[in-house]
Image (cartoon, rainbow, N blue to C red):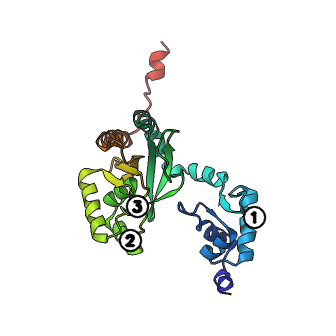
């Protein structure tokens, strides 16, 4: 009955996004009962919407009866024009970082209370991690997330602290004072570290990306084994991020009006 009252008067689009919001990085696939519990929608509504989304390719129905985000939704997310320029500029430097380290390289942007991964480069030898293109990452326990906290408006850190700090491993910073001090250090060094804070056996280091106005556009990071040479990795990330920021701050080249005249003679 509670689900029905919550569902009353809501548009189909609103209910559809409520259902989609149930999927998270920690819960990439859900049973119908999970969708009902997490969305607060009636079971019949959840089932009807889920079936329609599967038919559209937005969700997938797995062999074990669960629902998962489908390729069509990932495709729509990756085609967003908002971050295409950032991805275009960062792409060659991400490729170089991967070639130098053979570890996961990721590009993330601020998105509310999470970091959103908009590009990722990895290979068979890279350490396993939970990052997926288009997926969210926690701000308080990842390298890219800490960079976003350090160089965003201070109110973002306050909102994250107010929302509570989820513990993922024994090394996750869940004390507000410790996280605040850590973010201050990231701001001083322009490097965000997270050593086994999200996943045991993995660490991440990231650096900020700025535009010509000094506004944070995103964070470039590497996820590597916790046994990796972190000094070497951090140096490579810092240099790549500086190169990306330099290009983001450069005005686009204007066409030379005399070029055709010179080459035509």
Q: Secondary structure at mark 1?
A: helix
| Residue 149 seen | yes
Q: Residue at x 49, y 41 (%)?
A: 121
Residue ID for mark 1: 51
Q: Quadrant of residue 60?
A: bottom right
**Residue 244 falls left or right of residue 46:** left
Mark yes or no: residue 14 visible: no
Asked whether 145 or 109 is in front, the reply is 145
Residue at disc 3, secondary structure: loop
Residue identified by numbered label 3: 139
For marks 2 and 3 on the same chain, the one whose residue lies earlier in the sequence? 3
**Distance between mark 2 and mark 3 Cα atoms:** 11 Å
What whole-number distance in Å separates the C-alpha atoms at marks 1 and 3? 33 Å
**Residue 142: percent from the left, percent from the top?**
39, 56
Dot 3: few (<14), some (14–19), or many (≥20) neighbours within 10 Å?
many
Q: Residue at x 45, y 22 (%)?
A: 259
Residue bearing the label numbered 2: 159
Mark 2 element type: helix
Q: Quadrant of residue 254?
A: top left
Residue 247, x across and y down, in percent: 37, 39
For the residues marked 2 and 1, what is the alpha-carbon distance in whole angstroms?
35 Å
| In this rendering, position of residue 245 left or right of residue 118 | left
């Amino acid at each position: 009955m509670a689900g029905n009252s919550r569902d009353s008067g809501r548009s189909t689009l609103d209910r559809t996004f409520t259902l989609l919001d149930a999927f998270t990085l920690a819960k990439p696939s859900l049973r119908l009962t999970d969708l009902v519990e997490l969305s607060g929608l009636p079971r019949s509504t959840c089932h009807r919407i889920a079936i329609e989304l599967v038919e559209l390719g937005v969700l997938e129905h797995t062999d074990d009866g669960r629902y998962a985000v489908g390729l069509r939704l990932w495709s729509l997310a990756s085609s967003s024009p908002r971050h295409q320029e950032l991805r275009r500029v960062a792409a060659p430097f991400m490729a170089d970082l991967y070639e130098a380290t053979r570890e996961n390289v990721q590009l993330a942007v601020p998105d509310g209370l999470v970091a959103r991964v908009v590009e990722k480069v990895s290979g068979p030898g890279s350490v396993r991690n939970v990052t997926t293109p288009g997926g969210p990452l926690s701000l308080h326990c990842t390298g890219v997330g800490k960079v976003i906290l350090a160089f965003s408006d201070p109110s973002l850190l306050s909102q994250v602290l107010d929302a509570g700090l989820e513990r993922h491993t024994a090394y996750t910073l869940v004390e507000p004072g410790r996280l605040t001090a850590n973010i201050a250090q990231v701001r001083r060094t322009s490097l965000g570290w997270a050593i086994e804070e999200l996943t045991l056996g993995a660490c991440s280091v990231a650096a900020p990306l700025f535009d010509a106005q000094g506004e944070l556009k995103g964070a470039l990071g590497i996820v590597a084994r916790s046994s990796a040479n972190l000094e070497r990795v951090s140096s490579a990330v810092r240099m790549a991020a500086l190169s990306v920021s330099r290009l983001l701050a450069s005005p686009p080249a204007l066409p030379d009006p005399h070029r055709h005249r010179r080459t035509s003679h």
